[in-house]
Amino acid sequence: MHPTRRQIVKLCLGGLVLLNWPRVGLASATRACRLSPEQTAGPFYLEDALLRQDITDGKPGVPLKLRFEVLRLEGCQPLGDAALEVWHCDAQGAYSGVGDDQASRFLRGVQITDAAGRAEFRSILPGFYPGRTNHVHVRVHLGERDIHTGQLYFPEAIILPAMTRPPYVHGSQEWTPREQDYIYRTQGGEQSVAELVKDGDGFIARLTLVVETRG
């Protein structure tokens, strides 16, 4: 049974998942508190993501660690006890929980930020689909409020080789570069490109999110 958003909120407030959290690297040694751009949640958002760190569910692809640092715009201080939610498509460009596979929840999950505002997920490098470049959806919940909805993008020169090999190649569909992605171009995508570094056979993507908590 998947937890509801209200159940996730209760977990955040209760601090039940803050034990034994891995230490993750900061996205930048210099904190520049510029509000992260709001971007569309898209048509594939579901409200019952699982509270978990490993979201792969056996999906094939290049291993990816997603490391986030969440800061308050006010004072540029870490935001702890916030529910950070991510979801993205698989290597073939498909999302879980839609179409004929409504029961699945692969590549979706929630983590609670620690006292330093950090959260980490284990996933795979997302694929692409018509009109959209590789991206990860991100949403931050504080209490019962959604305080940020954004997306994470990748340095193209680093990920493009993987897009030319299985399991990312699919049919005659061509890869979409960032500048041909309407969401990236019109909703501040250039501010949401992660720092990407090699990690064995995969990558670590780091991104700092600056959110406004008032309201």
Image (spheres, helix red, strand yellow):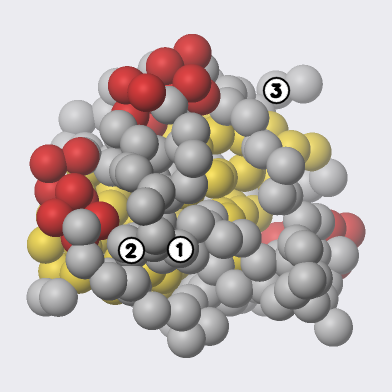
Query: Which of pointers 1 and 3 indicates the residue nearer the eye?
Result: 1
The residue that appears at 43% across and 26% down in the rendered structure is 181
Depth check: 108 or 178 in front? 178
Residue with the mark numbered 2: 168
Image quarter hosting the C terminus: top right
Comes first in the chain, label 2 or label 3: 2
Residue with the mark numbered 3: 214
Q: Secondary structure at mark 1?
A: loop
The residue that appears at 49% across and 57% down in the rendered structure is 93
- Whether residue 188 is visible: no
Looking at the image, residue 118 sits to the left or right of residue 85; the answer is left
Query: Which of pointers 2 and 3 indicates the residue nearer the eye?
Result: 2
Image quarter hosting the N terminus: bottom right
Residue 48 image-quadrant placement: bottom right
Cα–Cα span, label 2 and label 1: 6 Å
Instruction: Tell me whether circle 2 and circle 1 mark residues in contact (CB < 8 Å).
Output: yes
Looking at the image, residue 38 sits to the left or right of residue 153; the answer is right
Q: Characterize the local packing of mark 3: few (<14), some (14-19) or many (20 or more) Cα atoms within 10 angstroms.
A: few
Residue with the mark numbered 1: 92
